[in-house]
């Protein structure tokens, strides 16, 4: 199971990096969103994907699932959600002001 | 009783939320946030004193004993930085109160600054790696907002790059955390240090530490500073001053904490890499600082040089070098805020940020000129001012350690700092005045007061090194002997 997830993480990261390296702002943002999904899966698999009982709700189970990675992911998802929302608004405003969504055209010069 | 430890983070957040409701009242917001920051500074001063008498204080949230819960740990290093950043923020806010535009005052500037400082203070105080990530994000999200406030085209353009780069570096942070958790099964800093010491720093752990190095270098502007000059030179000047004084220091703090507490077992790899990166940063920053005619870019590259210089201390990693770095961090926060505020005032007065458009300011604004002169000497590390002691300690430690290349580069970079600012001083303050006495813009009453307070601070730190030294020595000692920190956090459980 872990190997499968790790391969998935690799695929997601590849896709994300391809998107982040493009010149279109929206593609970059989509890339960063996928990038964060990849790392969330990575954290989950790092905690071990064993089939255990719910943590800390009973005493009979032999195997407990590690609850910490899930707590970490929850926090990380919220943060990446906020950041993605912000950068989407930022990209929209930048498009309005600068009239382009091409990162190559946003280089800027000394005498703007 | 230890609950007071949470206040440097909690107070700005609560006041910040409150200020959102007072959006239209610019001056009231300014005064409230100023009071809040002064209060935070007072609390951190008290904490510093308490750490000195009672040893390291910790606060376990929800009563979860370490290593299980999240906790705040206050050692001298953290509290010194909290104290300095609170004071600097208060001063920058008073500059904002006096000088900024109405638009900025009512566009959630003050709440955002308070959220920023909450993130900064949280990053300094936290004792948990994941909590560090969260505090970093609080700080970064506020910095994104501050960077875009003002809404000029240039700001939006720089903000897109800044935000994208920081998202990627946060991604690296999470990757490093995931691998670290997979490798040692804990995220509490003291517990991590303990576990890493137990298993020895295997090549895998060293690799993870290098990923952390990349993350924090991106935040601190160590070698990976390509984003820094653009984003630090585009926002309104108060924001630039806050960024220059605080943001990079958080990355530096994280580097010091991680590489002195957790990953210090393979210095021949990690600390050598840090040394090389610091050397390259010094070279790049120096070249940048002398190659621009734009005042704000010069100031931004001066930030880069300081980062390189501070990290030289970590690369050498003897007690004297670490103490020197701590002095220098504190000095740099004061001096960089001063430099940015002065340059901002010069830009407002002359209406341009290019050196070519300014001349002979000394004649019309002598006090501004002399303040800039003091700032320049302070940044270059001339004796009675605050930069001196840090430079001396780091240099002598470099000699003792035989790191002559680092020594040469760090001293040469001081000359470049002096040269770049002297160039500004010569071009802008000396020479013929372009505007006559009648035409000159009046220097608004009080604009110089925050700058003069900072000038006073840099002189005071320079002259009062003696009274600061017990705190800094204690901070350096904790960094050099991680066991002090580990024992304080994990108690006698181990």
Image (cartoon, rainbow, N blue to C red):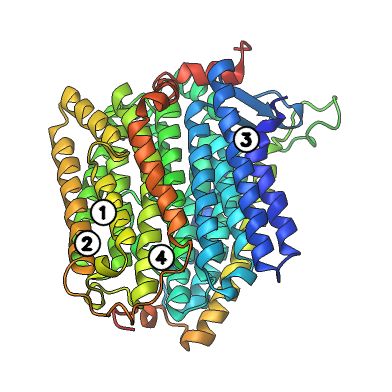
Looking at the rendered structure, the secondary structure element under dot 3 is: helix
The location of residue B430, given as percent across then percent down, is 18, 66
The location of residue B194, given as percent across then percent down, is 51, 20
Looking at the rendered structure, the secondary structure element under dot 1 is: helix
Q: Which residue is mark 4?
A: B231
Q: Which residue is mark 3?
A: B43
Mark 1 or mark 3: whose residue is earlier in sequence: 3
Marks 1 & 2 on one chain? yes
Q: Which residue is mark 1?
A: B373
The residue shown at (75%, 35%) is A52
- Give the alpha-carbon distance from disc 2 to disc 3, as whole Å: 38 Å
The residue shown at (59%, 75%) is B103
Chain letter for mark 4: B
Mark 4 or mark 1: whose residue is earlier in sequence: 4
The location of residue A41, given as percent across then percent down, is 60, 51
Q: Nearer the viewer, mark 4 or mark 1?
A: 1
Left or right of B472 in this view: B359: left
- Give the alpha-carbon distance from disc 2 to disc 4, as whole Å: 24 Å
Q: Nearer the viewer, residue B469 or B227?
A: B469
Mark 4 or mark 3: whose residue is earlier in sequence: 3
Looking at the rendered structure, the secondary structure element under dot 2 is: helix
Tell me if label 4 and label 1 are in contact, CB under 8 Å: no
Q: Nearer the viewer, residue B116 or B167?
A: B116
């Amino acid at each position: 199971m872990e190997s499968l997830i790790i391969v998935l993480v690799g695929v997601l990261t590849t896709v994300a990096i391809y998107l982040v390296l493009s010149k279109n702002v929206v593609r970059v943002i989509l890339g960063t969103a996928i990038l964060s999904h990849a790392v969330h899966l990575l954290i989950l698999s790092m905690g071990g994907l064993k089939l255990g009982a719910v943590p800390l709700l009973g005493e009979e189970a032999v195997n407990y699932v590690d609850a910490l990675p899930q707590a970490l992911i929850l926090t990380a998802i919220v943060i990446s959600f906020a950041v993605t929302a912000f950068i989407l608004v930022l990209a929209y405003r930048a498009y309005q002001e600068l009239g382009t969504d091409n990162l190559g055209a946003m280089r800027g010069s000394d005498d703007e | 009783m230890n609950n007071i430890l949470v206040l440097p983070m909690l107070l700005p957040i609560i006041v910040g939320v409150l200020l959102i409701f007072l959006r239209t009242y610019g001056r009231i917001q300014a005064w409230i946030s100023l009071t809040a920051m002064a209060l935070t500074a007072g609390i951190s001063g008290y904490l510093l004193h308490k750490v000195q008498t009672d040893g390291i204080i910790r606060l376990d949230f929800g009563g979860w004993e370490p290593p299980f819960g999240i906790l705040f740990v206050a050692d001298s290093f953290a509290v010194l930085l909290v104290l300095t950043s609170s004071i600097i923020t208060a001063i920058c806010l008073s500059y904002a109160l006096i000088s900024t535009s109405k638009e900025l005052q009512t566009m959630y500037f003050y709440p955002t600054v308070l959220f920023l400082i909450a993130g900064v203070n949280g990053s300094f105080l936290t004792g948990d790696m994941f909590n560090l990530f969260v505090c970093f994000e609080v700080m970064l999200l506020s910095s994104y907002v501050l960077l875009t406030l003002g809404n000029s085209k240039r700001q939006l353009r720089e903000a897109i790059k800044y935000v994208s780069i920081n998202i990627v570096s946060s991604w690296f942070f999470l990757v490093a955390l995931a691998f670290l958790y997979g490798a040692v099964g804990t995220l509490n800093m003291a517990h991590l240090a303990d576990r890493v010491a137990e298993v020895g720093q295997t090549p895998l752990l060293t690799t993870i530490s290098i990923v952390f190095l990349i993350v924090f270098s991106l935040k601190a502007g160590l070698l990976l500073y390509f984003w820094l000059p653009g984003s630090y030179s585009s926002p309104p000047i108060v924001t630039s001053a806050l960024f220059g004084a605080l943001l990079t220091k958080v990355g530096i703090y994280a580097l010091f904490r991680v590489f002195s507490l957790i990953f210090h077992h393979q210095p021949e790899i990690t600390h050598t890499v840090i040394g090389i990166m610091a050397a390259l940063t010094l070279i790049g920053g120096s070249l940048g600082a002398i190659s621009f005619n734009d005042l704000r870019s010069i100031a931004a590259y001066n930030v880069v040089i300081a980062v390189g210089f501070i990290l030289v201390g970590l690369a050498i990693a003897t007690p004297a070098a670490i103490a020197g770095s701590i002095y220098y961090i504190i000095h740099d926060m004061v001096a960089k805020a001063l430099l940015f505020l002065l340059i901002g005032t010069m830009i407002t007065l002359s209406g341009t940020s290019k050196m070519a458009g300014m001349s002979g300011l000394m004649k019309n604004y002598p006090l501004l000129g002399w303040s800039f002169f003091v700032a320049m000497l302070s940044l270059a590390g001339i004796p009675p001012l605050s930069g001196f002691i840090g430079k001396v300690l780091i240099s002598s430690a470099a000699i003792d350690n035989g790191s002559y290349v680092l020594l040469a580069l760090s001293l040469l970079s001081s000359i470049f700092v002096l040269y770049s600012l002297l160039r500004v001083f010569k071009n802008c303050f000396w020479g013929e005045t372009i505007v006559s006495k009648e035409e000159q813009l009046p220097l608004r009453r009080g604009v110089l007061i925050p700058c003069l307070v900072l000038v006073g601070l840099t002189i005071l730190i320079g002259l009062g090194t003696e009274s600061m030294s017990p705190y800094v020595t204690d901070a350096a000692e904790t960094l050099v002997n991680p066991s002090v920190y580990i024992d304080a956090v994990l108690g006698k459980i181990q």
